[in-house]
Image (cartoon, helix red, strand yellow):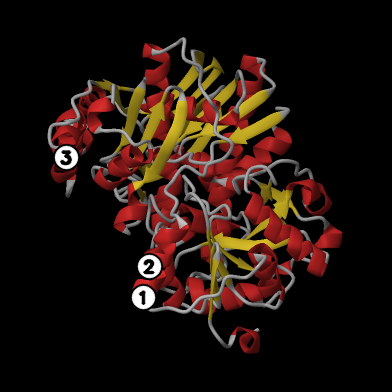
Amino acid sequence: MAAILGINCYKHDSTATLLVDGEVVAAAEEERFRRIKHYSGYPALAVEYVLREASLDPGDVDHIAFYMLPGLVMRENLAHSRYYLFRKGGFAFLLSQLNASRKMRNIGVTAGDHLRGRLTAPVTFVEHHRAHADAALFCSGFERAAVLTMDGVGERDTSILASGSGSDLRIHSRSRFPNSPGIFYSAVTGYLGFKPDNDEYKVMGLSSYGRPLFLDLFRRMISADRGRINVDTGLLDIHMGVHHASFRPEVSRVIGPPRMPGAPITGIHEDIACSAQKVLEEVGLSLARHLRMVSGEDRLVISGGVGLNCVMNGLIERESGFAQVYPMPASHDAGTSLGAALQVHRRFYPDVPLQVPAGMYLGPSYSEEEILSELKMAKLSWQRPENLAVKTAELVAEGRIVALFNGRMEFGPRALGNRSILADPRREEMKDILNRVVKHREPFRPFCPSCLLESSGDYFQGCGEAPYMIKTYPVLEEKKGDIPSVTHVDGTARVQTVDRNVNPFYYQVIESFQRITGVPVVLNTSFNIRGEPIVASPLDAIRCFYGTGIDDLVMPPFLLSKEGGKERS
């Protein structure tokens, strides 16, 4: 048996992945267990979960794979130390970076102590962007492809352009810190009053409301040429990383003062978001087109935190010249625990074939007995409908808000029908209702459509298979009136196509909704409230259900319902 434990931690989005004999047995983010979004510490609970899922003792693990080269992290920070030492907070920042690299170097000791000395496997450290690349190539199922990674920074790289296969990858070009697309976008996020390195998706959603009035300014700030990114640090002070990046006074004089968190969002903020988004799209498209030319490949995979920008991904798919474009569903650092494990597998077990998972349902599931135990402990009442999928569709069609907790939890930031909140996309008011009584989030952020795979092209222009909500597609003009609550202000939607063979229950729900309404689409948003991770356990689901305006909770085979949903709708 070949058991490899992949770990990512000490930056953000800590995760653990277990690869056994070439199969991804389990992968999960620590935030889901600790209930702390983007948790960055050692992923003790995720490690325990993946071992439990495989019924392995820690002593059965043959290798630990880590997603970073800590020695290079330390050397790079020391090389840039002159930028830190003579500015406010710089010395403390440098110490924090060096301490993080020290903890990375000691990950084997930390894991061994956590598991009481029963985990003694050797540690292999893997280059950060190579971990991103390996995870994307593997999950795509492509035998070979071009690879584009973009993020804040790994050890020193912020982007690589490569091509080949997981076992034979050729690097065509690299961009290095401080030429960072991720930190550029995070600087805009912070300037707009959101949390940098956490809330970039809010800027993406806001951008559709604005005008690109500051396009020329941002083009001076960041650009791409011949496969490399360039950031003008005379306009953007980037050296102290995501949380300290700041615009120079010349920029502030043009775009105005930063928005304070919680302050009203004005037209100027929308225009800043729009301009930054357009420039990021131009950079990504330039890199992809250059990679198409130098690689000669017809397929492209995208990874790194910037790869979660679904608007950019949609543009790249339409205009880069690649026949197929696959953004990694867990493009952010969470996916690097998988990528690191894959690289170690290829290094030590090249003759053991790898098995691509059918979907990203790699987290914990709970048996009927475990769910029933929680319901009884909470002294709740429930039903057991004869056909729960049909009943779920009927409730959604009635205008009720239905939470769905089913099967294994999704790996990555998107809820794909197993930890989801469902609603009727035909009701234009449903977006405001969800924001008011459940999500408590900004009104400019769109909700997503889950569509039967066979019907995707009938509603979304150019959409075939798109299972991960990571690319946007234009909604066909004649269908916008049918699904107004999932059509964004710019006429696009972040689509999830649902395959009968990958998620049978969710498919049955949407298929039943189609029989009732004629529309093969439901509104899907993650099962959580603002500021909390997606629910992981039955108890998490029950708490969220009773703490919000959700009308019904489906936990197969059980249905829990509240009164009043029809009156509200």
| Circle 1 Cα neighbour tier, 10 Å, few/some/many (<14 / 14–19 / ≥20) | few
> Compared to 538, does 186 lie above or below?
above
Numbered label attached to residue 114: 3
| Secondary element at image label 3 | helix
Pointer 2 residue: 374
- Image point (69%, 30%), residue name: 324
**Along the line of sight, which residue is nearer the eye, 460 or 317?**
460
What is the spatial separation of the Cα atoms under label 3 and label 1, in whole angstroms? 32 Å
What is the spatial separation of the Cα atoms under label 1 and label 2, in whole angstroms? 6 Å
| Secondary element at image label 1 | loop
Q: Are marks 3 and 2 in contact (CB under 8 Å)?
A: no
Q: Amino acid at mark 1?
A: Ala
Specify whether 226 is left or right of 260. right
Pointer 1 residue: 378
Residue 366: give x, y in percent of width and height.
43, 54
Q: Amino acid at mark 2?
A: Glu
| Circle 2 Cα neighbour tier, 10 Å, few/some/many (<14 / 14–19 / ≥20) | some
- N-terminal of the two: label 3 or label 1? 3
Identify the image quadrant of residue 488: bottom right
What is the spatial separation of the Cα atoms under label 3 and label 2, in whole angstroms? 28 Å
User: How many numbered tags mark residues here?
Assistant: 3
**Along the line of sight, which residue is nearer the eye, 12 or 89?**
12
Task: Point out the frontmost of discs 3 and 1.
Answer: 1
Specify whether 163 is left or right of 74. right
- N-terminal of the two: label 3 or label 2? 3
Specify whether 383 is left or right of 116. right
